[in-house]
Structure formats: C-alpha cells, structure tokens
Image (cartoon, helix red, strand yellow):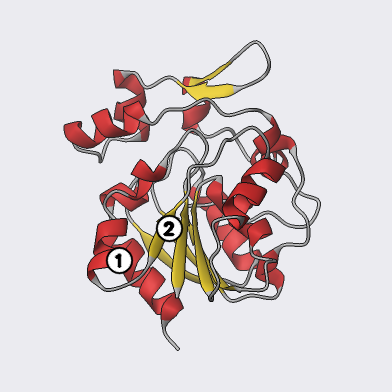
Amino acid sequence: MQIVLVHGAGGTPATWDAVAPLLRERGHPVTAVTNPMVSLEGDVAHTTAAIGDGPVLLVGHSYGGAVITNVGRHPQVRGLVYIAAFAPGEGETVQQIVERYEPAPVSKHMRRGPNGEWRSERTEAYWAEIGWDLTPEQRVASGSENRQADRRIFEQPTGVPAWRTLPSWYLVAEQDATLLPQIQRDMAARAEADTETVPGSHFTPLVHPDRVVALIERALAP
C-alpha cells in the first residue's frame, strides 16, 4: 500500500526524515509531498495528485491532518493516520479549533506578515519552550524548513471529513506546546480514532520515528 506523508504548516518533507527511511527499509512505498501552503483547497488538490493507482494510507502531521481529512475522500484511500495533527469536522477550520481553547505556548513565537501570512520565529527561546527534545542537528534542519504559511490554510473550512467513514489512528504528543494535547485528544475521540500517546514535543516524527512507524504499520495490518 502506498503511504503518503503530509507535513504541517511551514514544513517540508524534512518533517519525515527519520520516518521515511524506516518505512522504506521495511519495504513500504512512500511518497512525501511538498505542499504550497497557499490555501487548504490547494494543498488538498496537490496531495490528491500524489495518489497513485493502488490503495493509499494517508499520514499527516500538524496542519497536514486537515489536508488528509479532506484528501481521504478519494476512493483509493484506505485509512488516516494523525501524528499530533488536526482532524477538523465538516465546515470547521483549523483556526476555529484553536480558538476554542487557551492559547498554546507557541503563539508567542508566531509572527504575522503584511498579508496575514504566518511564520514561527525560531529563536533560542522557541527551541527551549517548543522543541526542547530535538538535538542541535535536528534544530538546524527544522529551522531550514520554516516556510511561510498563508492564512487561508487555517481559515478555509473542511468538507465532509474522511474520518467519518475511514478507519483512523492518532498519536497524541503529551507535552506538545504547539497543538495542545487536550485538543489532540478531543479530536481523536470525535473521530473515534485508535489512539496512542507518546511523550515529547510537537516534533514527534523526528523525536519518536519508531513510534510513528509502529502506528503506521498497525494501520497497514489486515
């Protein structure tokens, strides 16, 4: 089964640098997309275009969860795996989900551009509070993938969520200071996802690639 990996806001396929090699070593075909992050609709179309001819398992991190929630309506998709990710409901936006809860610590490190676009400020204070469990080498790599994200990726509503009809799995990051763990648990429960927890920050794919791969392989099991 093809595995399509979808990064979050500001990200690139480097999000999966520790996960993709492990999956390929186990013989799984992997596709890691690079979404434009101009609109949710555009990212959904871009990810959908990466789907091949056979069955697909979608894996999304952070905002990438909103993308796979919509791409999952494609008839070849067999399941959804959320890694500390958004799983919006019908008509719901990422922004609406966040605003129902107290601000996450990451909010103080976010900077908005003149057209409403967002980017995180990756200072020493950011790493100490948000990504404390990354190695110095991982911080350098993650800092290089800090792309700008248009506000529309957070403000465009989701269509009928694929988790209504597809099996879903969710990995909650217990000390996440970007997407609060309570938000993750609430979304996982609403989607009736098979849920596991892992210690650590929002950078779960880099910090715990073994746990991410284990959950993906559970989703692939007959």
- Is 6 situated left or right of 71 in this image? left
Residue 61, compared with residue 59, is above or below; it is above
Q: Earlier in the sequence, mark 1 or mark 2?
A: 1
Question: Quarter holding the C terminus?
Answer: bottom left
Residue 165, compared with residue 36, is above or below; it is below
Q: Secondary structure at mark 1?
A: helix
Q: Amino acid at mark 2?
A: Thr
- Is 189 situated left or right of 148 in this image? right
Q: Which of the 4 quarters of the picture holds residue 117?
A: top right
x then y, percent, for residue 13: 39, 45
Residue positioned most to the front: 53
Q: Residue at x 64, y 65 (%)?
A: 72
> On residue 23, which mark appears?
1
- Is 215 situated left or right of 55 in this image? left
Q: Amino acid at mark 1?
A: Leu
Q: Residue at x 63, y 75 (%)?
A: 166
Q: Callout 2: few (<14), some (14-19), or many (20+) C-alpha neighbours within 10 Å?
A: some
Mark toward the viewer: 1 or 2: 2
Q: Which of the two residues, 220 or 111, is positioned nearer the viewer here?
A: 220
Residue 4, compared with residue 113, is above or below; it is below
CB-based contact (under 8 Å), mark 1 and mark 2 = no
Question: Quarter holding the N terminus?
Answer: bottom left
For disc 2, the marked residue is: 31
Q: Which of the 4 quarters of the picture holds residue 160?
A: bottom right
Q: Residue at x 48, y 69 (%)?
A: 195
Residue positioned most to the bottom: 222
